[in-house]
Amino acid sequence: MAKAKLKIGVSSCLLGERVRYNGEHKYNQIVIDLLGDRFEAVPVCPELEMGVPREPVQIVAGNEHLVGVESGKDWTKAMASFNSKKLEEIAQLNLSGFIFKSHSPSCGLRDIPVYNETGLAQVETTAGLFAQVFMKRFPSLPVIDEEALQDKQTREIFIARII
Ligand code: SF4
């Protein structure tokens, strides 16, 4: 009997799914090559429930709110509800790691701008809001983003941690 593949969560847009705010994707060949035949991808897009296309969002200071760049709508509550539902589903899947999309206010692992109340000036940086709750819930799971995967040695260390 074939051995079950290890499951890796992946930000959906990296797999070529058209889930970005503008209806586009961020297909990434390095991610696809890493998954190969060895791993099973579990696509996750935390912003999908906001619809496609949707307005872009940014993180605003004061408890890190997720706010629509154009409308100023506060998506924090809706996203928190989606995130907790998604984390429960993920907990059942026995993931071995997660590949996040960099530079996203939801998925980015680091260096995501936090803006002041006007939404115009950056005051600090943080991790994306979904990435934050994911790492809090699964602190021992290896996580990485597609930019870090470009480095061969970093990639091999990530794979070694997964398996
Ligand atoms: S929320 Fe994450 S998975 Fe969804 S489009 Fe943005 S970066 Fe990709």
Image (cartoon, rainbow, N blue to C red):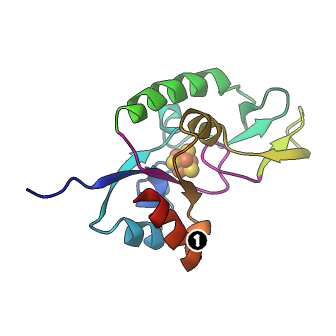
Magenta stretch: give its range. 94-111
Element on which disc 1 rests: helix
The residue that mark 1 highlights is 154
Nearest the eye: 31 or 142:
142
Magenta stretch: includes residue 8: no
Residue at image point 62% right, 35% down:
136
Residue at image point 53% right, 33% down:
50
In which quadrant of the rendered image does the C terminus lie?
A: bottom left
State the image coordinates of residue 93 (x, y, percent, origin top left).
34, 38
In which quadrant of the rendered image does the N terminus lie?
A: bottom left
- Give the farthest residue toward the bottom: 152
In this view, 51 is above or below 158:
above
State the image coordinates of residue 125 (x, y, percent, origin top left).
82, 47
State the image coordinates of residue 126 (x, y, percent, origin top left).
77, 45
State the image coordinates of residue 137 (x, y, percent, origin top left).
56, 33
Visible in this render: residue 21? no
Visible in this render: residue 162? yes
Residue at image point 52% right, 38% down:
46
In this view, 35 is above or below 124:
below
Magenta stretch: includes residue 108: yes
Main SS, magenta region, reads: loop
Q: Going by the image, does 79 lie left or right of 113?
A: left
How packed is label 1: few (under 14 Cα within 10 Å), some, or many (20 or more)?
few
Name which residue type carries label 1. Answer: Thr
Q: Going by the image, does 135 lie left or right of 114?
A: left
Nearest the eye: 138 or 121:
138
